[in-house]
């Protein structure tokens, strides 16, 4: 272990937390109750450290492995309304062409329900009244659009259901399991809410959202007469509304002036809205159904932490509740509604308990134009300020950072760095004005928000101005490249994970099924057809000559969103210009690193890289078996 600025003897530094604890697989996670309440499924590694779906009879210790994924590990699964059938999704080495697999818990027979090469499956709906079927979107006939198919869970029959005219990006089924609502992308970058009274009637437009608004369909009421929708129209923040399909009148169910509606809890059989969340600095619940008010009061008292309803049985007598903390694992409890009692199930990473983890503090600062930027600050233990600092930028950019345990933030803080995670303009959750403030502002005011965050840290004596790095994935990777090219004197180094370097080639190489969203993308970023010079002016690739500081890039070879060429073209440009760059390509990954071997390898490389240029501590890289990384240094 080494450090150029932090000396163990002069400080009260906590012990190094091993990378495999922070970035390895969880022990158990994602618990889900079967709809009959008899079984508990969860994800856990097998003896080869590959994530599989496991099963236990509720209350028993008969845990057994259900799946046998050979390499990538299962990260998404759910119960169907057949008591003995689970569904999981899996792609091939990160290509995002997800297949849908069913697993019978009695026979362990696995069936590929969508055995089509180069085709992506999207789950649309399941319904307790139609337990033998699932509605799935498949781009089988045209890679650019997803038609609706009805798949029989008993025999695997795939039946064509509803044709996509080419612009529909979301489907909603009514209580009779018929597709009667949809959301279509429009040429202006907005969207339309479509509805038809019956499957043989033409679609009608119920509402148009312009390019600066957001909206969508959520679900139908049990009688099919009301459509629950989300929308920012007539308000700044996204509201939850009940749309009367006869009168076309809308009634507000839940709203906040500043924050968008987050999660929505719907009754499992009666279909009415029971609770809504708003993500402010943390998660806040608004209970709408008095039938569950006492339950929410009860689960709030089970243990500290930010709680969420994770799963429930069809009879609605048993819930699984998860409790999130910023300095420890997620704790899962089985809650009995009748007795208002709870039973601890497990935590996802018990090895995090009693480790020197640190709190994540919500903060805010003013951007140079007066806009309030919210975010989170994580500080190291055992060192006095000013700290070497990492500006950790989220992806999207139409996403946001949230409060809670963050392995990257904890890893960096443990190595001696302060970590700032800003929700810069363009981030979601804070209303449409905040999102729209980021329109056409890539590498402009969106980047100013990041620099203003750096200045805020420096002014408060938190950050050492000579030892600040910028790091992130996807858009955060792009922001890293912008940081080293547009503001070359601010950062000591940068770490880019699957970030685009050229907005022109990024837009030219998007997956075909993103084509309906291209108008929205061009409205918010820039028009590929008419503004090539503008996009070029916001692309770090063309400003490589300005780079002064070292760069580390990590890339997945099968990334369908940010192609391998996005990283390799800037690596090549830097190599030609004799700029310091390290490049790691993972041959079996896509948009991010799913396999723990690859995560552990990349963060080992990144840790040593940051220590070299910021002076923090690092855990020496040992022989990490099974990773696919190819390292190049120039």
Image (cartoon, rainbow, N blue to C red):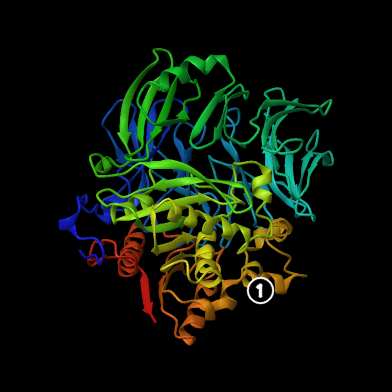
Q: Is residue 437 left or right of residue 43?
A: right
Viewer-closest of 115 and 322 = 322
Q: Is residue 230 left or right of residue 337?
A: right
Q: Is residue 463 left or right of residue 210?
A: left
Residue 106 appearing in the image: no
Residue that protrudes farthest toward the left in the picture: 9
User: Where on the picture, by quarter, is residue 135?
Assistant: top right
Quarter of the C terminus within the rendering: bottom left
Quarter of the N terminus within the rendering: bottom left
Please name the residue that numbered disc 1 is placed on.
Answer: 536
User: Where on the picture, by quarter, is residue 300?
Assistant: top left
Which secondary structure lies at badge 1? helix
Viewer-closest of 462 and 492 = 462
Residue 399 appearing in the image: yes
User: Where on the picture, by quarter, is residue 261?
Assistant: top right
For image coordinates 24% across by 52% down, the residue present is: 17
Q: Measuring from the top left, give residue 3's x and y in whole percent.
A: 24, 65
Q: Measuring from the top left, give residue 324's x and y in whole percent.
A: 39, 36
């Amino acid at each position: 272990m080494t450090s150029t600025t932090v000396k163990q003897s002069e400080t009260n530094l906590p012990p190094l937390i091993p990378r495999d604890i922070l970035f390895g697989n969880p022990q158990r996670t994602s618990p889900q109750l079967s709809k009959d309440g008899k079984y508990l499924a969860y994800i856990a590694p097998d003896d080869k450290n590959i994530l599989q779906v496991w099963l236990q009879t509720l209350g028993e210790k008969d845990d057994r492995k259900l799946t046998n994924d050979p390499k990538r590990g299962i990260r998404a699964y759910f119960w169907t309304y057949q008591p003995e059938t689970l569904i999981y999704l899996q792609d091939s080495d990160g290509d995002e062409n997800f297949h849908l697999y069913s697993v019978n818990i009695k026979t362990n027979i696995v069936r590929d329900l969508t055995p089509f090469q180069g085709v992506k499956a999207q789950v649309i709906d399941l319904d307790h009244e139609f337990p033998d079927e699932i509605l799935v979107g498949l781009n089988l006939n045209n890679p650019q659009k997803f038609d609706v198919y009805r798949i029989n869970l008993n025999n695997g029959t795939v039946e064509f259901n509803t044709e996509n005219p080419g612009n529909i990006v979301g489907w909603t089924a009514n209580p009779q399991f018929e597709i009667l609502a949809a959301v279509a992308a429009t040429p202006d970058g907005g969207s339309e809410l479509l509805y038809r009274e019956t499957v043989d009637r033409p679609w009608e437009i119920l509402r148009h959202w312009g390019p600066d608004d957001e909206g969508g369909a959520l679900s139908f009421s049990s009688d099919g007469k009301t459509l629950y929708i989300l929308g920012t129209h007539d308000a700044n923040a996204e509201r939850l509304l009940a749309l009367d399909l006869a009168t076309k009148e809308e009634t507000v169910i839940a709203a906040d002036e500043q924050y968008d509606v987050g999660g929505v809890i719907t009754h499992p059989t009666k279909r009415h809205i029971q609770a809504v969340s708003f993500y402010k600095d943390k998660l806040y619940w608004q209970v709408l159904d008095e039938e569950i008010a006492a339950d929410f009061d009860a689960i709030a008292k089970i243990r500290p932490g930010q709680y969420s309803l994770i799963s429930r049985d069809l009879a609605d007598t048993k819930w699984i509740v998860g409790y999130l903390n910023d300095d420890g694992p997620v704790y899962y409890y089985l809650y009995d509604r009748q007795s208002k009692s709870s039973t601890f199930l497990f935590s996802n990473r018990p090895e995090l308990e009693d480790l020197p983890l640190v709190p994540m503090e919500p903060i805010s600062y003013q951007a140079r134009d007066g806009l309030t930027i919210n975010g989170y600050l994580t500080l190291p233990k055992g060192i006095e300020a000013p700290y070497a600092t990492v500006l950790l930028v989220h992806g999207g950019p139409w996403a946001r950072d949230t409060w809670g345990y963050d392995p990257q933030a904890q890893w960096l803080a443990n190595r001696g760095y302060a970590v700032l995670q800003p929700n810069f303009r363009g981030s979601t959750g804070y209303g449409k004005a905040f999102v729209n403030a980021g329109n056409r502002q890539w590498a402009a005011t969106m980047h100013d928000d990041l620099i203003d965050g750096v200045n805020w840290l420096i002014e408060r004596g938190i950050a050492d101005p000579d030892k600040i790095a910028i790091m992130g994935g996807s858009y955060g990777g792009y922001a890293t490249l912008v940081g080293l090219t547009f503001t070359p004197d601010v950062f000591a180094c940068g770490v880019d994970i699957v970030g685009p370097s050229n907005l022109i080639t990024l837009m030219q190489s998007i997956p075909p099924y993103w084509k309906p969203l291209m108008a929205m993308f061009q409205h918010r970023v820039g028009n590929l057809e008419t503004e090539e010079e503008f996009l070029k002016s916001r692309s770090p690739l063309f400003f490589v000559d300005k780079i002064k500081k070292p760069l580390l890039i990590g890339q997945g070879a099968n990334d369908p969103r940010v192609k391998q060429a996005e990283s390799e073209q800037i690596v090549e440009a830097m190599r030609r210009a004799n700029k310091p760059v390290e490049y790691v390509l993972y041959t079996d990954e896509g948009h991010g690193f799913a396999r723990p071997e690859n995560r552990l390898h990349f963060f080992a490389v990144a840790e040593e890289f940051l220590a070299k240029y910021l002076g923090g501590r690092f855990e020496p890289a040992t022989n990490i078996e099974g990773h696919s990384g190819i390292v190049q240094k120039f």
